[in-house]
Image (cartoon, rainbow, N blue to C red):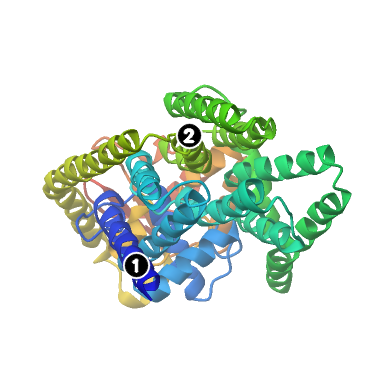
Amino acid sequence: MLNLKRTYLFNLFLLFLAFMFVFIFCAVSSPLTIYYTCDSSIFMTMGRLFIEGKTPYIDFFDHKGPVIILIEALGQLFAPYRKGIFILEILNLFFVFILINKIATLLLNRKMTITIILLFIVLLSSTISGGNSTEEFSLTPLFIALYVTCKFFFKSHSLKASDIFIIGLCFSSLFWLRLNNAGAICGMLFFLFVNSIARKDYKSLKNIIVYFLIAQLPLTLLFVAYFYYHDGLYDLIYATFIFNFKYTQPPHIGKHIWLSLLLIAIAITGTLLQYKKNRDKSIFLFTFSILIFNILTSNIGYVFKHYLILLMPSYILSMMLVLGCISDDKVKKIVFYISVVSAVAVFTVKGNKEIKSIPENRRKFTSYSDSAKKILNNIQPNQMNQVYYYKVDPSFYSILRVSPNYKYFILQEWQGSHDANIYVEINETMCKTPPLWVMIEKKDNADWNINELDNKGFCHIIESLYKPFSENDNFILYKYK
Protein backbone atom coordinates (compact mmCIF):
# COMPACT_ATOMS: atom_id res chain seq x y z
CA MET A 1 0.00 0.00 0.00
CA LEU A 2 2.85 2.35 0.90
CA ASN A 3 4.62 1.66 -2.41
CA LEU A 4 1.37 2.23 -4.30
CA LYS A 5 0.91 5.58 -2.57
CA ARG A 6 4.49 6.58 -3.37
CA THR A 7 3.99 5.64 -7.03
CA TYR A 8 0.77 7.66 -7.14
CA LEU A 9 2.46 10.71 -5.61
CA PHE A 10 5.45 10.36 -7.91
CA ASN A 11 3.19 10.22 -10.97
CA LEU A 12 1.38 13.34 -9.73
CA PHE A 13 4.77 15.02 -9.46
CA LEU A 14 5.57 14.00 -13.06
CA LEU A 15 2.19 15.32 -14.25
CA PHE A 16 2.83 18.63 -12.48
CA LEU A 17 6.31 18.76 -14.02
CA ALA A 18 4.83 18.13 -17.48
CA PHE A 19 2.25 20.88 -16.91
CA MET A 20 4.90 23.39 -15.82
CA PHE A 21 7.19 22.53 -18.73
CA VAL A 22 4.48 22.97 -21.36
CA PHE A 23 3.18 26.09 -19.59
CA ILE A 24 6.59 27.77 -19.77
CA PHE A 25 8.39 26.28 -22.78
CA CYS A 26 5.65 25.43 -25.30
CA ALA A 27 4.83 28.95 -26.42
CA VAL A 28 2.53 27.90 -29.27
CA SER A 29 -0.08 26.51 -26.87
CA SER A 30 0.69 27.90 -23.41
CA PRO A 31 -1.89 30.24 -21.84
CA LEU A 32 1.14 32.25 -20.70
CA THR A 33 1.88 33.46 -24.23
CA ILE A 34 0.36 34.61 -27.48
CA TYR A 35 2.62 33.01 -30.03
CA TYR A 36 2.37 31.02 -33.26
CA THR A 37 4.92 29.20 -35.37
CA CYS A 38 4.70 28.06 -38.97
CA ASP A 39 4.55 24.29 -38.46
CA SER A 40 2.32 24.41 -35.38
CA SER A 41 -0.19 26.64 -37.16
CA ILE A 42 -0.27 24.31 -40.16
CA PHE A 43 -0.77 21.27 -37.93
CA MET A 44 -3.59 22.90 -35.95
CA THR A 45 -5.31 23.93 -39.18
CA MET A 46 -5.04 20.42 -40.64
CA GLY A 47 -6.46 18.88 -37.48
CA ARG A 48 -9.40 21.26 -37.64
CA LEU A 49 -9.98 20.59 -41.36
CA PHE A 50 -9.97 16.83 -40.78
CA ILE A 51 -12.62 17.22 -38.07
CA GLU A 52 -14.64 19.32 -40.51
CA GLY A 53 -14.71 16.31 -42.84
CA LYS A 54 -12.10 17.31 -45.39
CA THR A 55 -9.71 14.70 -46.82
CA PRO A 56 -5.96 15.17 -46.30
CA TYR A 57 -3.83 15.74 -49.42
CA ILE A 58 -6.95 16.01 -51.58
CA ASP A 59 -8.84 18.89 -49.97
CA PHE A 60 -5.78 20.32 -48.20
CA PHE A 61 -2.07 19.73 -48.80
CA ASP A 62 1.00 19.48 -46.62
CA HIS A 63 3.97 17.15 -46.75
CA LYS A 64 3.76 15.65 -43.24
CA GLY A 65 2.34 12.16 -42.73
CA PRO A 66 -1.29 11.43 -41.79
CA VAL A 67 -0.41 10.54 -38.17
CA ILE A 68 0.24 14.19 -37.30
CA ILE A 69 -3.21 15.06 -38.67
CA LEU A 70 -4.81 12.46 -36.39
CA ILE A 71 -2.80 13.74 -33.42
CA GLU A 72 -3.82 17.33 -34.08
CA ALA A 73 -7.43 16.32 -34.60
CA LEU A 74 -7.35 14.61 -31.21
CA GLY A 75 -6.08 17.83 -29.67
CA GLN A 76 -8.86 19.80 -31.34
CA LEU A 77 -11.40 17.36 -29.88
CA PHE A 78 -10.09 18.18 -26.39
CA ALA A 79 -10.59 21.91 -26.95
CA PRO A 80 -10.39 24.39 -29.87
CA TYR A 81 -7.02 25.40 -31.31
CA ARG A 82 -4.27 26.26 -28.77
CA LYS A 83 -6.20 25.00 -25.72
CA GLY A 84 -6.53 21.50 -27.14
CA ILE A 85 -2.86 21.37 -28.11
CA PHE A 86 -1.93 22.53 -24.60
CA ILE A 87 -3.74 19.53 -23.10
CA LEU A 88 -2.27 17.19 -25.71
CA GLU A 89 1.30 18.34 -25.08
CA ILE A 90 0.93 17.90 -21.32
CA LEU A 91 -0.33 14.34 -21.73
CA ASN A 92 2.38 13.50 -24.26
CA LEU A 93 5.16 14.80 -22.01
CA PHE A 94 3.67 13.06 -18.97
CA PHE A 95 3.81 9.73 -20.82
CA VAL A 96 7.40 10.49 -21.85
CA PHE A 97 8.37 11.16 -18.22
CA ILE A 98 6.82 7.85 -17.14
CA LEU A 99 8.70 6.01 -19.88
CA ILE A 100 12.02 7.67 -19.00
CA ASN A 101 11.44 6.72 -15.38
CA LYS A 102 10.79 3.08 -16.35
CA ILE A 103 13.91 3.02 -18.54
CA ALA A 104 16.08 4.62 -15.87
CA THR A 105 14.93 2.21 -13.13
CA LEU A 106 16.51 -0.63 -15.11
CA LEU A 107 19.90 0.68 -13.94
CA LEU A 108 19.33 3.45 -11.39
CA ASN A 109 17.68 4.13 -8.03
CA ARG A 110 14.78 6.58 -7.60
CA LYS A 111 16.98 9.61 -6.89
CA MET A 112 19.00 8.99 -10.05
CA THR A 113 15.85 8.47 -12.16
CA ILE A 114 14.67 11.92 -11.05
CA THR A 115 18.11 13.22 -12.02
CA ILE A 116 17.69 11.72 -15.51
CA ILE A 117 14.25 13.35 -15.91
CA LEU A 118 15.55 16.74 -14.78
CA LEU A 119 18.54 16.54 -17.13
CA PHE A 120 16.13 15.59 -19.92
CA ILE A 121 14.09 18.73 -19.14
CA VAL A 122 17.20 20.92 -19.21
CA LEU A 123 18.18 19.75 -22.71
CA LEU A 124 14.62 19.59 -24.06
CA SER A 125 14.05 23.21 -23.03
CA SER A 126 16.76 24.33 -25.46
CA THR A 127 15.38 22.35 -28.42
CA ILE A 128 11.58 22.53 -28.04
CA SER A 129 11.29 25.67 -30.27
CA GLY A 130 7.76 26.57 -29.18
CA GLY A 131 6.35 23.05 -29.15
CA ASN A 132 3.67 21.19 -31.14
CA SER A 133 6.11 19.56 -33.54
CA THR A 134 6.28 16.07 -35.05
CA GLU A 135 9.55 15.60 -33.17
CA GLU A 136 7.88 16.33 -29.83
CA PHE A 137 5.09 13.81 -30.42
CA SER A 138 7.65 11.28 -31.67
CA LEU A 139 9.13 11.04 -28.17
CA THR A 140 6.41 8.69 -26.89
CA PRO A 141 6.91 5.93 -29.52
CA LEU A 142 10.68 6.47 -29.42
CA PHE A 143 10.83 5.91 -25.66
CA ILE A 144 8.41 2.97 -25.77
CA ALA A 145 10.77 1.28 -28.23
CA LEU A 146 13.80 2.26 -26.14
CA TYR A 147 12.23 0.79 -23.00
CA VAL A 148 11.57 -2.54 -24.71
CA THR A 149 15.13 -2.63 -26.09
CA CYS A 150 16.75 -1.61 -22.80
CA LYS A 151 14.70 -4.18 -20.90
CA PHE A 152 16.04 -6.88 -23.24
CA PHE A 153 19.65 -5.69 -22.93
CA PHE A 154 19.83 -4.96 -19.21
CA LYS A 155 17.33 -7.43 -17.71
CA SER A 156 15.60 -10.20 -19.62
CA HIS A 157 18.15 -11.05 -22.37
CA SER A 158 15.15 -12.69 -24.01
CA LEU A 159 13.40 -11.28 -27.06
CA LYS A 160 9.70 -12.09 -27.26
CA ALA A 161 7.56 -11.78 -30.36
CA SER A 162 5.44 -9.18 -28.54
CA ASP A 163 8.56 -7.05 -27.96
CA ILE A 164 9.30 -6.88 -31.67
CA PHE A 165 5.65 -6.22 -32.46
CA ILE A 166 5.63 -3.23 -30.08
CA ILE A 167 8.84 -1.84 -31.58
CA GLY A 168 7.34 -2.37 -35.04
CA LEU A 169 4.19 -0.45 -34.11
CA CYS A 170 6.33 2.42 -32.83
CA PHE A 171 8.28 2.45 -36.09
CA SER A 172 5.06 2.34 -38.13
CA SER A 173 3.61 5.32 -36.27
CA LEU A 174 6.75 7.34 -37.03
CA PHE A 175 6.92 6.08 -40.62
CA TRP A 176 3.48 7.62 -41.20
CA LEU A 177 4.34 10.69 -39.15
CA ARG A 178 7.75 11.68 -40.53
CA LEU A 179 10.15 8.95 -41.62
CA ASN A 180 13.29 10.74 -40.40
CA ASN A 181 11.91 10.64 -36.86
CA ALA A 182 12.31 6.85 -36.72
CA GLY A 183 16.11 6.93 -36.85
CA ALA A 184 16.66 5.80 -33.25
CA ILE A 185 14.28 2.86 -33.72
CA CYS A 186 16.20 1.81 -36.84
CA GLY A 187 19.30 1.73 -34.63
CA MET A 188 17.52 -0.42 -32.05
CA LEU A 189 16.38 -2.88 -34.72
CA PHE A 190 19.88 -3.02 -36.19
CA PHE A 191 21.29 -3.83 -32.75
CA LEU A 192 18.71 -6.55 -32.09
CA PHE A 193 19.27 -8.06 -35.54
CA VAL A 194 23.08 -8.17 -35.29
CA ASN A 195 22.94 -9.30 -31.65
CA SER A 196 20.70 -12.22 -32.58
CA ILE A 197 23.10 -13.27 -35.33
CA ALA A 198 26.07 -12.99 -32.97
CA ARG A 199 24.30 -15.18 -30.39
CA LYS A 200 23.12 -17.55 -33.12
CA ASP A 201 19.60 -17.01 -31.82
CA TYR A 202 17.82 -17.70 -35.10
CA LYS A 203 14.40 -17.90 -33.47
CA SER A 204 14.73 -14.28 -32.33
CA LEU A 205 16.07 -13.39 -35.76
CA LYS A 206 12.98 -14.87 -37.36
CA ASN A 207 10.74 -13.03 -34.88
CA ILE A 208 12.47 -9.72 -35.64
CA ILE A 209 11.72 -10.08 -39.35
CA VAL A 210 8.23 -11.59 -39.15
CA TYR A 211 6.70 -9.63 -36.29
CA PHE A 212 8.23 -6.33 -37.34
CA LEU A 213 6.59 -6.73 -40.75
CA ILE A 214 3.29 -7.77 -39.18
CA ALA A 215 3.40 -4.65 -36.98
CA GLN A 216 3.47 -2.48 -40.12
CA LEU A 217 0.04 -3.73 -41.18
CA PRO A 218 -2.46 -2.06 -38.79
CA LEU A 219 -1.64 1.57 -39.57
CA THR A 220 -0.64 0.91 -43.17
CA LEU A 221 -3.86 -0.92 -43.99
CA LEU A 222 -5.88 1.76 -42.20
CA PHE A 223 -4.38 4.57 -44.27
CA VAL A 224 -4.40 2.60 -47.53
CA ALA A 225 -8.08 1.72 -47.04
CA TYR A 226 -9.03 5.30 -46.11
CA PHE A 227 -7.23 6.94 -49.03
CA TYR A 228 -8.27 4.21 -51.48
CA TYR A 229 -11.88 4.89 -50.50
CA HIS A 230 -11.34 8.62 -51.11
CA ASP A 231 -9.42 7.96 -54.35
CA GLY A 232 -6.33 9.57 -52.84
CA LEU A 233 -3.65 6.86 -52.62
CA TYR A 234 -1.34 8.68 -55.00
CA ASP A 235 -1.96 11.95 -53.16
CA LEU A 236 -0.89 10.28 -49.90
CA ILE A 237 2.27 8.83 -51.43
CA TYR A 238 3.13 12.04 -53.25
CA ALA A 239 2.73 14.27 -50.19
CA THR A 240 4.49 12.12 -47.61
CA PHE A 241 7.28 10.67 -49.76
CA ILE A 242 7.72 12.09 -53.27
CA PHE A 243 7.45 15.77 -52.32
CA ASN A 244 9.64 15.25 -49.24
CA PHE A 245 12.42 13.77 -51.36
CA LYS A 246 12.28 16.82 -53.62
CA TYR A 247 13.52 19.13 -50.88
CA THR A 248 15.47 16.74 -48.62
CA GLN A 249 19.20 17.35 -48.46
CA PRO A 250 21.95 14.87 -47.49
CA PRO A 251 23.34 14.95 -43.92
CA HIS A 252 25.50 18.01 -43.36
CA ILE A 253 27.14 19.98 -40.60
CA GLY A 254 24.82 22.70 -39.31
CA LYS A 255 24.96 25.33 -36.61
CA HIS A 256 23.35 22.94 -34.12
CA ILE A 257 26.10 20.32 -34.47
CA TRP A 258 27.20 21.14 -30.91
CA LEU A 259 24.46 18.93 -29.48
CA SER A 260 25.46 15.96 -31.61
CA LEU A 261 29.08 16.40 -30.53
CA LEU A 262 28.03 16.67 -26.88
CA LEU A 263 25.93 13.54 -27.25
CA ILE A 264 28.81 11.63 -28.85
CA ALA A 265 31.09 12.60 -25.95
CA ILE A 266 28.52 11.46 -23.34
CA ALA A 267 27.87 8.23 -25.25
CA ILE A 268 31.57 7.37 -25.49
CA THR A 269 32.06 8.13 -21.79
CA GLY A 270 29.05 6.09 -20.66
CA THR A 271 29.87 3.15 -22.91
CA LEU A 272 33.50 2.95 -21.78
CA LEU A 273 32.46 3.16 -18.12
CA GLN A 274 29.89 0.40 -18.58
CA TYR A 275 32.39 -1.79 -20.41
CA LYS A 276 34.94 -1.26 -17.64
CA LYS A 277 32.29 -2.21 -15.08
CA ASN A 278 30.76 -5.28 -16.78
CA ARG A 279 33.26 -6.27 -19.50
CA ASP A 280 30.47 -6.84 -21.97
CA LYS A 281 31.53 -5.85 -25.50
CA SER A 282 27.95 -5.84 -26.74
CA ILE A 283 27.47 -2.48 -24.98
CA PHE A 284 29.40 -0.86 -27.84
CA LEU A 285 27.04 -2.27 -30.45
CA PHE A 286 24.02 -1.36 -28.33
CA THR A 287 24.97 2.27 -27.70
CA PHE A 288 26.47 3.18 -31.05
CA SER A 289 23.86 1.47 -33.23
CA ILE A 290 21.22 3.78 -31.75
CA LEU A 291 23.53 6.81 -31.66
CA ILE A 292 24.73 6.62 -35.28
CA PHE A 293 21.26 6.08 -36.78
CA ASN A 294 19.93 8.81 -34.47
CA ILE A 295 22.48 11.43 -35.48
CA LEU A 296 22.40 10.67 -39.21
CA THR A 297 18.60 10.83 -39.55
CA SER A 298 18.37 13.94 -37.36
CA ASN A 299 20.76 15.85 -39.61
CA ILE A 300 19.11 15.14 -42.97
CA GLY A 301 17.64 18.09 -44.86
CA TYR A 302 17.05 21.53 -43.39
CA VAL A 303 18.28 21.02 -39.82
CA PHE A 304 16.18 23.14 -37.48
CA LYS A 305 16.75 23.24 -33.75
CA HIS A 306 13.62 21.24 -32.93
CA TYR A 307 14.95 18.34 -35.04
CA LEU A 308 17.43 17.76 -32.22
CA ILE A 309 14.55 16.60 -30.00
CA LEU A 310 14.99 13.32 -31.87
CA LEU A 311 18.39 12.84 -30.21
CA MET A 312 16.75 12.42 -26.79
CA PRO A 313 16.67 8.57 -26.81
CA SER A 314 20.46 8.45 -27.28
CA TYR A 315 20.88 11.23 -24.72
CA ILE A 316 18.84 9.41 -22.07
CA LEU A 317 20.58 6.09 -22.75
CA SER A 318 24.04 7.70 -22.61
CA MET A 319 23.31 9.63 -19.40
CA MET A 320 21.89 6.47 -17.84
CA LEU A 321 25.11 4.59 -18.65
CA VAL A 322 27.20 7.34 -17.06
CA LEU A 323 25.07 7.65 -13.91
CA GLY A 324 24.81 3.87 -13.61
CA CYS A 325 28.57 3.70 -13.06
CA ILE A 326 28.60 6.13 -10.14
CA SER A 327 28.90 4.12 -6.93
CA ASP A 328 29.86 6.85 -4.46
CA ASP A 329 26.75 8.14 -2.63
CA LYS A 330 28.29 11.58 -2.17
CA VAL A 331 28.87 11.91 -5.91
CA LYS A 332 25.29 10.78 -6.57
CA LYS A 333 23.98 13.48 -4.22
CA ILE A 334 26.11 16.14 -5.92
CA VAL A 335 24.86 15.11 -9.37
CA PHE A 336 21.28 15.09 -8.10
CA TYR A 337 21.55 18.59 -6.62
CA ILE A 338 23.22 19.89 -9.78
CA SER A 339 20.32 18.55 -11.85
CA VAL A 340 17.78 20.16 -9.49
CA VAL A 341 19.56 23.53 -9.58
CA SER A 342 19.92 23.35 -13.38
CA ALA A 343 16.22 22.56 -13.87
CA VAL A 344 15.12 25.33 -11.49
CA ALA A 345 17.45 27.81 -13.19
CA VAL A 346 16.13 26.84 -16.64
CA PHE A 347 12.52 27.20 -15.53
CA THR A 348 13.23 30.55 -13.88
CA VAL A 349 15.29 32.10 -16.65
CA LYS A 350 13.11 30.85 -19.49
CA GLY A 351 9.92 31.72 -17.63
CA ASN A 352 11.16 35.25 -17.06
CA LYS A 353 12.07 35.57 -20.73
CA GLU A 354 8.63 34.35 -21.83
CA ILE A 355 6.86 36.76 -19.48
CA LYS A 356 8.91 39.67 -20.80
CA SER A 357 8.03 38.73 -24.40
CA ILE A 358 4.26 38.66 -23.82
CA PRO A 359 3.56 42.39 -24.48
CA GLU A 360 5.60 42.35 -27.69
CA ASN A 361 3.95 39.15 -28.93
CA ARG A 362 0.53 40.49 -28.04
CA ARG A 363 1.15 43.68 -30.04
CA LYS A 364 2.50 41.71 -32.99
CA PHE A 365 -0.34 39.24 -33.28
CA THR A 366 -3.05 41.75 -32.35
CA SER A 367 -1.80 44.07 -35.10
CA TYR A 368 -1.74 41.19 -37.57
CA SER A 369 -5.23 40.08 -36.56
CA ASP A 370 -6.68 43.60 -36.77
CA SER A 371 -5.13 44.13 -40.18
CA ALA A 372 -6.59 40.88 -41.52
CA LYS A 373 -10.01 41.53 -40.00
CA LYS A 374 -10.24 44.94 -41.71
CA ILE A 375 -9.75 43.23 -45.06
CA LEU A 376 -12.11 40.35 -44.29
CA ASN A 377 -14.85 42.79 -43.24
CA ASN A 378 -15.24 43.62 -46.94
CA ILE A 379 -16.47 40.09 -47.61
CA GLN A 380 -20.04 39.01 -46.94
CA PRO A 381 -20.37 36.05 -44.53
CA ASN A 382 -22.01 33.92 -47.24
CA GLN A 383 -18.98 34.54 -49.49
CA MET A 384 -16.29 33.44 -47.01
CA ASN A 385 -16.11 30.02 -48.67
CA GLN A 386 -15.18 31.73 -51.96
CA VAL A 387 -11.90 33.25 -50.78
CA TYR A 388 -8.47 31.99 -51.79
CA TYR A 389 -5.87 33.01 -49.21
CA TYR A 390 -2.56 33.09 -51.07
CA LYS A 391 0.83 33.25 -49.35
CA VAL A 392 -0.66 34.22 -46.00
CA ASP A 393 1.33 33.30 -42.93
CA PRO A 394 0.26 29.85 -41.65
CA SER A 395 -0.75 31.47 -38.35
CA PHE A 396 -3.46 33.34 -40.28
CA TYR A 397 -5.95 30.47 -39.97
CA SER A 398 -5.42 29.92 -36.24
CA ILE A 399 -5.45 33.60 -35.32
CA LEU A 400 -8.51 34.46 -37.44
CA ARG A 401 -10.28 31.14 -36.77
CA VAL A 402 -11.09 30.72 -40.45
CA SER A 403 -10.80 27.62 -42.62
CA PRO A 404 -9.00 27.58 -45.97
CA ASN A 405 -11.10 26.81 -49.01
CA TYR A 406 -8.49 25.44 -51.41
CA LYS A 407 -6.05 22.53 -51.47
CA TYR A 408 -2.82 24.52 -51.49
CA PHE A 409 -3.62 26.75 -48.56
CA ILE A 410 -0.17 27.64 -47.20
CA LEU A 411 3.41 28.18 -48.40
CA GLN A 412 2.32 28.05 -52.03
CA GLU A 413 5.45 29.81 -53.29
CA TRP A 414 7.76 27.58 -51.23
CA GLN A 415 5.98 24.42 -52.33
CA GLY A 416 6.00 25.51 -55.96
CA SER A 417 9.73 26.25 -55.81
CA HIS A 418 10.31 22.53 -55.07
CA ASP A 419 7.74 21.20 -57.51
CA ALA A 420 6.59 23.46 -60.36
CA ASN A 421 3.60 21.16 -60.93
CA ILE A 422 2.04 22.72 -57.83
CA TYR A 423 2.10 26.10 -59.58
CA VAL A 424 0.46 24.48 -62.61
CA GLU A 425 -2.28 22.89 -60.48
CA ILE A 426 -2.96 26.15 -58.62
CA ASN A 427 -3.18 28.13 -61.85
CA GLU A 428 -5.42 25.57 -63.55
CA THR A 429 -7.81 25.71 -60.59
CA MET A 430 -7.81 29.52 -60.73
CA CYS A 431 -8.75 29.43 -64.42
CA LYS A 432 -11.35 26.65 -64.28
CA THR A 433 -13.16 27.71 -61.11
CA PRO A 434 -11.91 31.19 -60.20
CA PRO A 435 -12.70 32.15 -56.59
CA LEU A 436 -14.70 35.30 -56.03
CA TRP A 437 -12.00 36.75 -53.78
CA VAL A 438 -8.21 36.41 -53.54
CA MET A 439 -6.43 37.67 -50.44
CA ILE A 440 -2.64 37.99 -50.56
CA GLU A 441 -0.25 38.89 -47.74
CA LYS A 442 2.32 41.56 -48.57
CA LYS A 443 4.70 40.87 -45.67
CA ASP A 444 4.77 44.53 -44.48
CA ASN A 445 6.19 45.74 -47.77
CA ALA A 446 4.69 49.14 -48.62
CA ASP A 447 6.02 49.00 -52.20
CA TRP A 448 4.77 45.48 -52.82
CA ASN A 449 3.18 44.59 -56.15
CA ILE A 450 1.73 41.40 -57.58
CA ASN A 451 4.75 40.77 -59.82
CA GLU A 452 6.90 40.04 -56.76
CA LEU A 453 5.29 36.60 -56.57
CA ASP A 454 7.36 33.74 -58.00
CA ASN A 455 4.33 32.11 -59.61
CA LYS A 456 4.18 34.31 -62.70
CA GLY A 457 1.23 32.42 -64.12
CA PHE A 458 -0.74 33.29 -60.98
CA CYS A 459 0.30 36.95 -61.37
CA HIS A 460 -1.06 36.97 -64.93
CA ILE A 461 -4.35 35.43 -63.80
CA ILE A 462 -4.80 38.03 -61.05
CA GLU A 463 -4.02 40.90 -63.41
CA SER A 464 -6.37 39.52 -66.10
CA LEU A 465 -9.34 38.31 -64.06
CA TYR A 466 -9.26 40.37 -60.85
CA LYS A 467 -9.26 43.95 -59.70
CA PRO A 468 -7.87 45.35 -56.42
CA PHE A 469 -10.70 45.86 -53.95
CA SER A 470 -9.10 46.74 -50.61
CA GLU A 471 -5.57 47.10 -49.26
CA ASN A 472 -3.60 47.88 -46.11
CA ASP A 473 -0.01 47.50 -44.94
CA ASN A 474 -0.26 43.71 -44.60
CA PHE A 475 -2.80 42.47 -47.12
CA ILE A 476 -4.38 43.16 -50.47
CA LEU A 477 -7.81 41.88 -51.48
CA TYR A 478 -8.75 41.20 -55.10
CA LYS A 479 -12.25 40.65 -56.44
CA TYR A 480 -13.21 38.70 -59.53
CA LYS A 481 -14.17 41.12 -62.33
Answer above or below: position of 2 versus 43: below
Residue at 58% of width from left, 69% of height from top? 55
Give the crowd class for mark 1: few <14, some 14-19, many >=20 residues within 10 Å: few
Q: Which residue is mark 1?
A: 6
Residues at marks 1 and 2 touching, judged by CB atoms closer than 8 Å: no
Depth check: 151 or 356 in front?
Answer: 151
Give amino acid for label 1.
Arg
Q: Relative to 10, is 385 on the left or the right?
A: right
**Number of numbered callouts drawn:** 2
Q: Nearer the viewer, residue 381 or 100?
A: 100
Locate the C terminus by quadrant. bottom left
Work out whether mark 1 precedes mark 2 in sequence or the reverse, and give the earlier one. 1
Q: Is residue 474 left or right of residue 123?
A: left
The residue under the point 30% across, 56% down is: 22
Residue linked to disc 2:
325
Q: CA distance from mark 1 to mark 2?
A: 26 Å
Q: Position of residue 170 (x, y in %)?
A: 62, 57
Q: Position of residue 20 (x, y in %)?
A: 25, 57
Q: Residue at x 41, y 56 (%)?
A: 97
The local secondary structure at tag 2 comes to: loop
Q: Residues within 10 Å of mark 2 (few under 14, many from 20)?
A: some
| Residue 394 image offset from top left, x and y in percent | 38, 52
Q: Which residue is rendered at x = 67% and y = 54% of the image?
A: 156
Residue 349 place in picture, x, y as percent: 18, 40
**Lateral position of residue 171 relative to residue 462, left or right:** right
| Quadrant where the image shows the N terminus | bottom left
Q: Is residue 224 above or below residue 156?
A: below
Type of amino acid at the residue the image marks with label 2: Cys
Q: From this viewpoint, is residue 237 visible? A: yes
SS of the residue under disc 1: helix
